[in-house]
């Protein structure tokens, strides 16, 4: 989110002083100098389009081209015929990027030539989806440590074949300790895309250097969430599974381990996917070095373990049966029917030789978007954006990243040329809650999605929002903005008509009540031996996770439920949060953990609540 440069105000001021422009800055900014653009070759045109994409990303969807200007700032100018040909080329470039060209400034030189400052602005959608508004598929990659998850993602997203010593995964590791151990400890996001014909678009593709370019070149894009397989980082993995609401889960197991392929950690990850109703498929790695005997043992273990796990977790649900994918045609067929069929696809690959990678690509290209993530009902609900990360960026300020669970966020409309600015209460949101249940009133200055600027996001999409905050003293007194908070609408969409007609009289309702104590249904996941598992009882304290919320909680009361799901014990519990009140509603899912005990819960009703207020009380 780099601050864009105002070409008209900044660089043409120097022209009035000394008759030239400052030298072009080629490594940053949204201003490009071009002496002329006349009849470029196809290869040259493709390079120019890529360059324009980058300038547009630097200017948050807007770029300025100084035509007839040399790189050193000299105003050489172009004849009328040359300028028309140059503008035609620029319009061709812009059309490829869903942008238009307008003339911002024209300067007539003394030699019958002129210089033009052209503004290129990308069309921003107001709904639906297009090349700048993808409804991306999110796939969480799970499994034990050392199975090849990061290596597989590196192969898919960067085209890096492994050497057999874990070199491919280096491109995904972020922290020094990850580099030293080779183990992922954080959630890593990587993007790939596919054309209509199924051709892979990734960072390994020609002329692709950014996520934005992947989006523009793809008919379908998907984000791969790499997670940690180590027990000490299970909370981070649960955060990815719970918080990002992935559309699919990819379980990675190694063929070399034979009957030990489904380790306790792999079993735990798979059980979470089943319990949260996330469609699961399996990738078996290291088939290039696994013996035929170990490979067969691995496949039998997968069949037995996945079937057994579903039976233990829920006897009433129709089980899904593991099925090996033997061809690219089978991969496409299984993927297209995955939401309706009772199948757990299993694909065998090698990250070293690339064996059968075409089957994975055929499968991913054919995957449908689960209907639950694009529900029209959710789009029409009040805004509910869950915060996963908070950043402080120079020249921008506070940026929150996360997932829009409900509703639709659109930037306030502004047209500087006509000097019209619209900022209504329906563009003001509440961020919170703090320790008192209060919400800070904020507005949004810009939205970035898939690392480039957009005007609109809708439910199910991830994004980064740059916030306009109240004065520093107000914000400091309110408290720290942190992970687990939510951004909510001040008004219900059904109230918008009344608000627009009577903006002064339509006062916003108070924020929703925050949960301090709630009743829930709790199901114990049968993953550890009963002797080593803490007993569900009143007074038991543990860690509660819901979405991106993480907080200590206590079971105030616990009664066995008459319902039983598989071999899982079910309880009716009263849960007390030991920290701040949180944004939870009836139906919210959560994980409760203490030692080897892991439970899946669902809020049934709020018992003790906190009613907060808007801070400040005046509109921004």
Image (tube, rainbow, N blue to C red):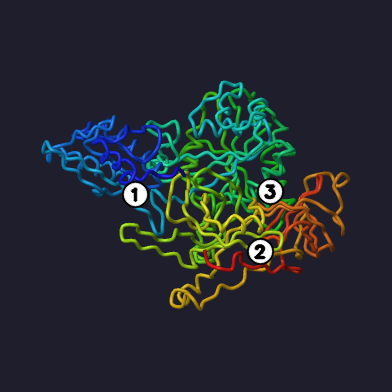
- Give me the C-alpha separation between circle 2 and circle 3: 33 Å
Q: Which secondary structure lies at badge 1?
A: strand
- Give me the C-alpha separation between circle 1 and circle 3: 41 Å
Q: Where is residue 599 in the image (x, y as percent from the top left)?
A: 76, 53
Residue nearest the observer in this picture, 130 or 478:
478
For label 3, the crowd category at 10 Å Cα-Cα, with few meaning under 14, some 14 to 19 and many 20 or more, is many
Residue identifier under label 2: 438
Q: Which secondary structure lies at badge 2?
A: loop
Image quadrant of residue 383?
bottom right
Q: Is residue 482 visible?
A: yes
Residue at 50 percent across and 32 percent down: it is 357
Q: Which secondary structure lies at badge 3?
A: helix
Labelled pair 2, 3 in contact (Cβ < 8 Å): no
Mark 2 vs mark 3: in front: 2
Q: Position of residue 407 (x, y in %)?
A: 52, 62
Residue at 40 percent across and 32 percent down: it is 27
Q: Can residue 319 be seen in this view?
A: no
Image quadrant of residue 108?
top left
Q: Where is residue 476 in the image (x, y as percent from the top left)?
A: 64, 55
Residue identifier under label 1: 122
């Amino acid at each position: 989110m780099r601050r864009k440069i105002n070409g008209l105000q900044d660089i043409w001021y120097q022209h009035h002083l000394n008759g030239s422009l400052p030298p072009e800055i080629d490594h940053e900014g949204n201003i490009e100098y071009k002496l002329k653009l006349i009849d470029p070759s196809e290869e040259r045109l493709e390079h120019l389009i890529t360059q324009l994409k980058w300038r547009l990303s630097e200017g948050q969807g807007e770029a300025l081209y100084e035509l007839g200007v040399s790189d050193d700032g000299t105003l050489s100018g172009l004849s009328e015929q040359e300028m028309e040909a140059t503008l035609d080329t620029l319009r061709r470039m812009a059309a490829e990027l869903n942008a238009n060209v307008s003339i911002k400034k024209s300067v007539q030189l003394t030699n019958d030539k002129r210089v033009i400052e052209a503004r290129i602005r990308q069309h921003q959608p107001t709904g639906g989806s297009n090349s700048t508004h993808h409804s991306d598929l999110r796939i969480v990659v799970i499994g034990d440590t050392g199975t090849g998850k990061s290596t597989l993602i590196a192969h898919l997203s960067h085209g890096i074949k492994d050497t057999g010593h874990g070199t491919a995964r280096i491109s995904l590791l972020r922290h020094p300790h990850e580099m030293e151990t080779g183990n992922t400890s954080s959630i890593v996001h990587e993007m790939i895309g596919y054309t209509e014909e199924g051709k892979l678009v990734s960072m390994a593709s020609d002329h692709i250097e950014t996520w934005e370019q992947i989006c523009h070149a793809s008919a379908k894009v998907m984000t791969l969430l790499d997670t940690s397989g180590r027990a000490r980082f299970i909370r981070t993995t649960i955060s990815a599974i719970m918080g990002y609401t992935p559309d699919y889960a990819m379980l990675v197991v190694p063929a070399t381990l034979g009957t030990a392929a489904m380790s306790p950690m792999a079993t735990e990850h798979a059980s979470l996917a089943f319990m949260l109703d996330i469609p699961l498929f399996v990738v078996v790695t290291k088939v290039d070095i696994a013996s035929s005997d170990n490979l067969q043992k691995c496949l039998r273990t997968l069949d037995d373990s996945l079937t057994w796990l579903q039976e233990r977790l829920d006897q009433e649900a129709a089980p899904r049966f593991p099925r090996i994918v033997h061809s690219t045609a089978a991969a496409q067929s299984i993927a297209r029917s995955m939401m309706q069929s009772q199948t757990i696809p299993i694909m065998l690959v090698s990250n070293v030789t690339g064996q059968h990678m075409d089957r994975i690509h055929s499968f991913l290209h054919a995957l449908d978007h689960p209907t639950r993530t694009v529900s029209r009902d959710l789009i029409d609900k009040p805004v509910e954006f869950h915060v996963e990360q908070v950043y402080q960026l120079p020249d921008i300020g506070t940026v929150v990243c996360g997932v829009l669970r409900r509703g639709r966020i659109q930037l306030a409309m502004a047209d500087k040329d006509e000097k019209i600015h619209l900022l209504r209460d329906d563009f003001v949101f509440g961020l919170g809650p703090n320790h008192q249940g209060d919400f800070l009133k904020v507005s949004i200055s810009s939205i970035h999605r898939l690392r480039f600027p957009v005007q609109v996001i809708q439910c199910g999409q991830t994004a980064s929002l740059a916030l306009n905050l109240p004065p520093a003293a107000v914000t400091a007194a309110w408290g720290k903005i942190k992970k687990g908070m939510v951004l909510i609408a001040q008004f219900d969409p059904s109230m918008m008509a009344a608000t627009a007609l009577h903006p002064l009289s339509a006062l916003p309702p108070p924020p929703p009540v925050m949960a301090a104590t709630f009743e829930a249904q709790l199901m114990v996941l049968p993953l550890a031996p009963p002797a080593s598992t803490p007993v569900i009882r009143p007074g038991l304290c543990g860690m509660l996770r819901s979405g991106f919320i993480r907080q200590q909680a206590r079971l105030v009361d616990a009664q066995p439920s008459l319902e039983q799901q598989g071999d899982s014990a079910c309880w009716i519990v009263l849960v007390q949060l030991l920290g701040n009140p949180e944004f939870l509603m009836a139906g919210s899912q959560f994980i409760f953990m203490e030692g080897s005990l892991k439970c899946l819960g669902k809020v049934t009703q709020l018992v003790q609540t906190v009613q907060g207020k808007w801070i400040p009380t005046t509109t921004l």
